[in-house]
Image (tube, helix red, strand yellow):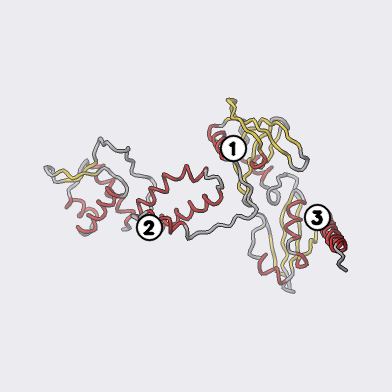
């Protein structure tokens, strides 16, 4: 029996019978007296369980009233490996959360994990520092905006947004019904029903210049509709009208690309010459073209023709700009 299972069992036995003697617990659990002493001490000292020993009854029981914080033996029982994993997850969230919004709310859980491990604060900080998350290109979101969006999602209320559409350099007012938060490539997005355009839209939270929580109840969109309209395409660009891209990678790039997931519905195959062919669905050329271009001469966009042309034009434009820059500096 694992330690986690024993702790559960001790709790159930004492609660079910009201009280249990030391010998009774040993017989039920089939463990040594030393092990039971350690488990009882751990429950009391690390988890804060209000277990007391009644000398007159020669038994252990839970205190019905305590002066300290209310105790609930958690549904969260972890062994030591799981606790270390939780510390790593906390570090991941902290690195993603530039202004500390998530970290602040998770701090009580982190402190509890430290206590359950029995480490000193210095040891706990050392553990957390063993994980380094590099968030290149991260676009920070204001803590106020993040909290308002989170509150609107949980309470199912609408938001009034002042939103910057960067492509047009236009700021508009939008009343939206939040559906879900999306974190993609170090950027936070909100999928919401936009009452101005009467449809589902994806908003970058870093482009929200102002947000107000409204009293109006959110419009709920069915999960199937949300997934069909927002998740089918490639990357962050939503769309239900999908096309399929066929992309061929030279052997040098194939070793890496064959291990990557570009889309949940992708299909890939190795070709006799060692190259790798990848098929992925997409709704808009923009992002998939950029990801194709980062492989330079090691990739070919095979189809559709519109995607091949978009990549070709982008490469030509970049080449002209580079040549023009070189000539402007007097470089032959």
The N terminus lies in quadrant: bottom left
Residue 264 picture quarter: bottom right
Q: Nearer the viewer, mark 3 or mark 1?
A: 1
**Disc 3/disc 2 C-alpha distance (Å):** 50 Å
- How would you rate the neighbour count of disc 1 (Cα within 10 Å): few for under 14, some for 14-19, many for 20 or more? some
Q: Position of residue 299 (x, y in %)?
A: 76, 65
Q: Earlier in the sequence, mark 3 or mark 1?
A: 1
189 or 30, which lies in front? 189
- Element class at badge 3: helix
Residue holding disc 3: 307
Check the image and report above or below for 117 versus 254: above
Residue holding disc 2: 80
- Element class at badge 2: helix
- At x 55% / y 47%, what residue is drawn? 97
Q: Position of residue 130 (x, y in %)?
A: 47, 60
The C terminus lies in quadrant: bottom right
Q: Is residue 282 left or right of residue 125?
A: right
Q: Is residue 61 left or right of residue 280?
A: left
- Mark drawn on residue 145: 1
Q: Nearer the viewer, mark 1 or mark 2?
A: 1
- At x 21% / y 59%, what residue is drawn? 32
54 or 116, which lies in front? 116
- How would you rate the neighbour count of disc 3 (Cα within 10 Å): few for under 14, some for 14-19, many for 20 or more? many
- At x 69% / y 38%, what residue is drawn? 201
Q: Is residue 330 left or right of residue 265?
A: right
Q: How many numbered dots are placed on residues in this image? A: 3
């Amino acid at each position: 029996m694992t330690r986690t299972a024993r702790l559960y069992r001790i709790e159930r036995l004492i609660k079910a019978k009201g009280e249990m003697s030391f010998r009774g617990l040993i017989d039920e659990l089939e463990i040594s007296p030393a092990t039971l002493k350690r488990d009882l001490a751990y429950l009391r000292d690390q988890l804060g369980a209000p277990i007391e020993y009644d000398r007159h009854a020669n038994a252990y029981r839970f205190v019905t009233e305590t002066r300290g914080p209310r105790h609930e033996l958690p549904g969260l029982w972890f062994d030591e490996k799981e606790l270390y994993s939780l510390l790593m997850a906390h570090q991941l969230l902290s690195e993603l959360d530039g202004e500390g919004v998530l970290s602040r709310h998770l701090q009580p859980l982190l402190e509890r994990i430290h206590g359950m491990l029995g480490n000193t604060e210095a040891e706990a900080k050392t553990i957390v520092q063993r994980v380094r998350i590099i968030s290149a290109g991260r676009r920070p979101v204001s803590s106020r905006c993040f909290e308002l969006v989170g509150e609107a999602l949980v309470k199912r209320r609408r938001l009034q947004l002042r939103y910057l559409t960067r492509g047009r350099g236009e700021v508009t007012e939008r009343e939206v019904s939040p559906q879900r938060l999306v974190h993609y490539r170090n950027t936070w997005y909100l999928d919401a029903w936009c009452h101005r355009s009467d449809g589902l839209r994806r908003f970058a939270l870093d482009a929200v210049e102002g947000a107000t929580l409204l009293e109006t109840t959110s419009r709920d969109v069915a999960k199937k509709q949300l997934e069909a309209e927002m998740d089918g395409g490639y990357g962050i660009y939503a769309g239900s009208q999908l096309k399929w891209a066929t992309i061929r990678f030279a052997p040098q790039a194939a070793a890496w690309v064959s291990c990557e997931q570009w889309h949940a519905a992708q299909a890939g195959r190795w070709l006799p010459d060692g190259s790798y062919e990848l098929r992925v669905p997409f709704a808009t050329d923009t992002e998939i073209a950029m990801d194709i271009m980062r492989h330079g001469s090691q990739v070919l966009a095979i189809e559709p023709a519109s995607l091949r042309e978009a990549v070709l034009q982008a490469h030509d434009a970049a080449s002209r700009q580079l040549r023009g820059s070189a000539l402007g500096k007097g470089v032959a």
